[in-house]
């Protein structure tokens, strides 16, 4: 039996919700992840650890908030599985500690990388309301808008310019370049990996803005501006990872918009696809020099390394990983740059392996093998469910987010690099939130569907 809402109830249903405490904490973590590097580069490097500590505190606070308010109990299957995994990680880490393979501080760092931010993503997805979700997506759009002018300035500035060097280090030799005189842009991040990871995170959200219903012309203008900012950010990144991953998402967006749209909406979808392609074409003509630099980057890289060997390393691990792998592992957290800094005073390199899979296997041993298997299981479930949801909502957005999350889970250096670790938790939270709010009602103008 259906209930009829009174006018008062209808107004209450359409009234925007306020940001919840969970949404506020999520945004604080998101903002800290993206802008902590800017503070370190241009204000003071001494702020790095306090900001990371504040971020971890907010992440833990959100987990406690979701547990205290009962949000985690609303989906006991995910919560129970994560709780069992947490017990296993803690038990195995203590076993490694007792066997002399690690130290207490490395073990605690390992719990941060292996558990805390996964709990954060699950807690955020369980406790955030629709206004929180909408605000988070729009915040990502505004971040991209603010990032684009900075990237343009970095791209056209010499490597030694203040915008490209850190406050306490003006050595040009430490600046990565695409070709002579053209830097690999970092945006607000202190290293190129953080920026390319950020571009991977925002790409599906930008396409979500393009897909969302826009009641007013200013919404269309905002979505278009963010899309152009994404094009600027990708083409001037000098990063093959950013170009390839964002290009793949763009192709999925184009194909998905035609494939998943309703029959009566396919003409409008086709127009949207053509407009997007025209924007890309005009942009590439306008920024031809940046396109030439990116092309040079790919050519130089192909001459110095085997592309498919690099792909194999990213997905599976370096050859030496399987030669040195033992059943116990070196200790959860041992391969992270934070642990390396604690042990040696330097975070310039990863102690165990460069690849994500390699670090996990060498840190955890048998537990690492199980971790990789669990990642593949989560990816399979999420991608299959997102395809079903895209068909149901007639939008490729769920699939776009989950394909990005799948790529992030398997390849981003999240077990070792602080920024990538935080960004992975953000995209994983978005991927879980898609299942709660699949309709993509990002702009005000009508009541959201429940």
Image (tube, rainbow, N blue to C red):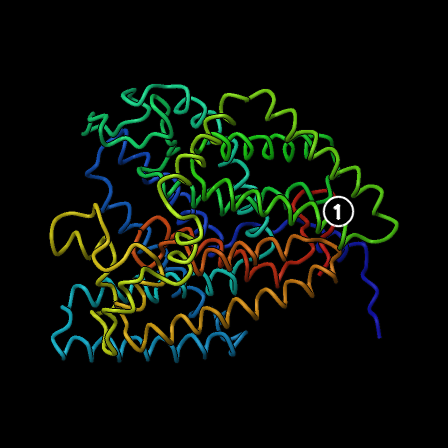
- Which residue is painted at 82% across and 41% down in the image? 268
Quadrant position of residue 81: bottom left
Q: Is residue 399 above or below residue 187?
A: below
Which residue is drawn at the image coordinates 19% and 76% (left, top)?
96
272 horizontally vs 115: left or right: right
Would you identify the image quadrant in which residue 225 lies? top right
Q: Provide residue 293's location: percent of width, then percent of height.
A: 45, 27
> Residue at 42% of width from left, 51% of height from top?
423
Quarter that holds the N terminus: bottom right
Q: Is residue 293 shown above or below 407?
A: above
Foreground: 66 or 307? Answer: 307
Task: Describe residue 324's horizontal placement relative to residue 446 as left or right.
Answer: left
Where is residue 450 drawn, in percent x and y?
71, 61
| Left or right position of 227 against 171 | right
Question: For this rendering, which residue is in front, 294 or 411?
Answer: 294
Residue with the mark numbered 1: 446
């Amino acid at each position: 039996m259906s209930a009829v809402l009174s006018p008062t109830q209808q107004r209450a249903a359409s009234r925007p919700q306020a940001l919840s405490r969970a949404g506020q904490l999520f945004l604080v973590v998101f903002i800290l992840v993206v802008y902590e590097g800017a503070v370190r580069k241009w204000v003071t490097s001494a702020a790095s650890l306090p900001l990371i500590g504040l971020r971890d505190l907010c992440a833990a606070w959100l987990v406690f908030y979701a547990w205290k308010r009962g949000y985690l109990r609303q989906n006991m299957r995910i919560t129970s599985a994560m709780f069992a995994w947490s017990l296993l990680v803690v038990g195995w880490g203590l076993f490694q500690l007792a066997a002399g393979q690690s130290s207490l501080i490395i073990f605690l760092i390992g719990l941060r990388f292996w558990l805390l931010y996964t709990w954060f993503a699950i807690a955020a997805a369980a406790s955030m309301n629709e206004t929180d979700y909408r605000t988070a997506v729009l915040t990502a759009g505004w971040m991209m808008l603010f990032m684009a002018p900075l990237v343009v300035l970095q791209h056209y500035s010499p490597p030694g310019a203040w915008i490209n060097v850190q406050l306490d280090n003006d050595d040009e030799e430490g600046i990565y370049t695409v070709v002579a005189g053209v830097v690999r842009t970092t945006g607000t991040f202190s290293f190129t990996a953080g920026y390319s990871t950020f571009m991977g995170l925002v790409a599906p959200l930008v396409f979500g803005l393009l897909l969302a219903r826009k009641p007013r012309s200013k919404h269309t203008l905002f979505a278009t501006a963010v899309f152009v900012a994404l094009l600027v950010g990708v083409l001037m990144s000098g990063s093959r990872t950013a170009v390839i991953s964002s290009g793949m998402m763009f192709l999925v967006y184009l194909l998905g918009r035609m494939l998943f749209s309703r029959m009566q909406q396919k003409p409008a979808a086709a127009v949207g696809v053509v407009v997007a392609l025209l924007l890309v074409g005009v942009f590439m003509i306008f920024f031809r020099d940046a396109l030439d630099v990116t092309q040079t980057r790919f050519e130089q890289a192909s001459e110095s390394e085997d592309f498919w060997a690099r792909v194999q390393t990213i997905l599976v691990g370096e050859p030496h990983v399987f030669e040195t792998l033992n059943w116990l592992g070196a200790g959860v957290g041992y391969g992270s740059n934070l642990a390396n800094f604690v042990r040696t005073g330097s975070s310039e390199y990863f102690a165990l392996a460069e690849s994500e899979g390699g670090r996990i296997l060498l840190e955890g041993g048998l537990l690492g093998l199980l971790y990789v298997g669990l990642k593949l299981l989560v990816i399979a479930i999420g991608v299959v469910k997102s395809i079903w949801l895209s068909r149901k909502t007639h939008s490729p957005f769920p699939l776009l987010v989950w394909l990005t999350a799948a790529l992030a889970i398997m390849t981003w250096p999240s077990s070792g690099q602080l920024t990538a670790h935080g960004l992975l938790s953000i995209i994983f939270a978005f991927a879980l939130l898609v299942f709660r709010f699949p309709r993509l009602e990002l702009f005000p103008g009508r009541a959201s569907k429940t």
